[in-house]
């Protein structure tokens, strides 16, 4: 099965629920967008997802594919934890199957996007692919040796909640200093605004006669205090003479020591890396959810809940 046939797909995002009905040739026949009612609680979110599918279901549709962010138990169809949705141990697939009376599958949203890109987008024909999606959250989808990787606990690619700053900014998951708290879309906008406002202020202020130099805006709490013991995101080991701001005892900034393999690594990655919008656009997760549902039906129709 390479294309979804008569499948309704729903992509549950932190701010928007996207849904589409795909026809026999994998073309979206009808689409729908709803705001995600996160402030109204888990039951409202679940009801909105079911509503989005119900509106698009027509005779001949089978099955329904869903995708969502967070820790997803694909086999059980359960959202174990999705901090941006306020959901914990939510049996989304079973609840939806009861409501729409159709087989329903559940996949991680970025893994679904990776699946779609692997089959019909950027990674078509590749056996190894990494897709990083920056949205309300931050996660990656991994195809290794031609297979979508979910990991032993189904959390492969969920790197957004690795803490990188001790006592850093509070993340939606409850931890402090997560990667996502600094680099997800909302975090970038939140942190960019003060800089932009300050820049505008400096432009206006510097035109005034007798102005005094302005200080640069401060970064957030914990920004310069990387946390040790966080795997591959560890900062370089500090020397005993390290001082805040990267200066040593003499007050000078030590020269940056480049990794000897860095030039070769950069050169090797440059022609294999694509930045910006994915070919399938923001609907890659939606198409991937449809593909996942159709593939699951083909593989084991009786097992799809
Ligand atoms: Zn977090």
Image (cartoon, rainbow, N blue to C red):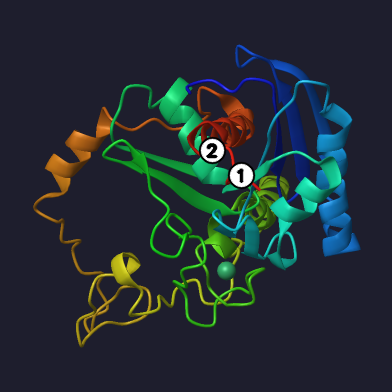
Residue beneath the point at 37% across and 74% down: 245
Tell me residue 299's x, y (percent).
Answer: 48, 36
Among all residues in the image, which is located at the extreme top? 25
Establish if 196 lies above or below 249. above
From the viewer's perspective, is 286 left or right of 19? left
Residue visible at 44% across and 71% down in the picture: 164
In-image side of 230 versus 26 (left or right): left
Badge 2 residue CB within 8 Å of ligand 1: no
Element at badge 2?
Answer: helix
Q: Earlier in the sequence, mark 2 or mark 1?
A: 2
Q: Which residue is mark 1?
A: 304
153 or 39, which lies in front? 153
Disc 2, disc 1: CB below 8 Å?
yes
Q: Write down the residue under mark 2.
A: 296
Depth check: 250 or 244 in front? 244
Residue drawn at 52 percent across, 31 percent down: 298
Residue 37 shows in the view = no
Find residue 171 and name its label.
none
């Amino acid at each position: 099965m390479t294309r979804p046939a008569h499948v309704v797909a729903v992509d549950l995002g932190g701010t928007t629920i996207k849904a589409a009905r795909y026809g026999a040739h994998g073309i979206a026949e009808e689409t729908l967008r709803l705001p995600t009612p996160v402030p109204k609680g888990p039951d409202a979110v679940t009801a909105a997802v079911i509503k989005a599918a119900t509106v698009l279901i027509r005779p001949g549709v089978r099955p329904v594919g869903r995708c969502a962010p967070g820790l997803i138990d694909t086999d059980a169809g359960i959202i174990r934890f999705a901090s941006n949705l306020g959901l914990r141990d939510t049996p989304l697939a079973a609840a939806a199957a009861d409501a729409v009376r159709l087989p329903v599958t559940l996949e991680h949203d970025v893994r679904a996007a990776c699946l779609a890109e692997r089959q019909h987008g950027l990674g078509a024909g590749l056996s190894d692919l990494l897709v990083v999606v920056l949205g309300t959250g931050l996660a990656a989808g991994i195809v290794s040796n031609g297979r979508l990787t979910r990991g032993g606990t189904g959390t492969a690619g969920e790197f957004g909640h690795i803490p990188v700053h001790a006592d850093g900014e509070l993340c939606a998951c409850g931890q402090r200093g997560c990667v996502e708290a600094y680099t997800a879309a909302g975090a970038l906008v939140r942190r960019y605004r003060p800089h932009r406002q300050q820049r505008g202020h400096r432009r206006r202020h510097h035109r005034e006669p007798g102005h005094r130099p302005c200080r640069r805006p401060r970064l957030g709490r914990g920004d310069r205090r990387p946390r040790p013991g966080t795997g591959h995101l560890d900062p370089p080991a500090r020397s005993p003479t390290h001082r805040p701001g990267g200066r040593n005892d003499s007050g000078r900034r030590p020269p940056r020591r480049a990794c000897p393999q860095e030039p070769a690594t950069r050169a090797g990655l440059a022609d294999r890396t694509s930045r910006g919008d994915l070919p399938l656009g923001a609907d890659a997760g939606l198409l991937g959810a449809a593909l996942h549902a159709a593939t699951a039906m083909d593989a084991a129709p009786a097992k799809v809940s």
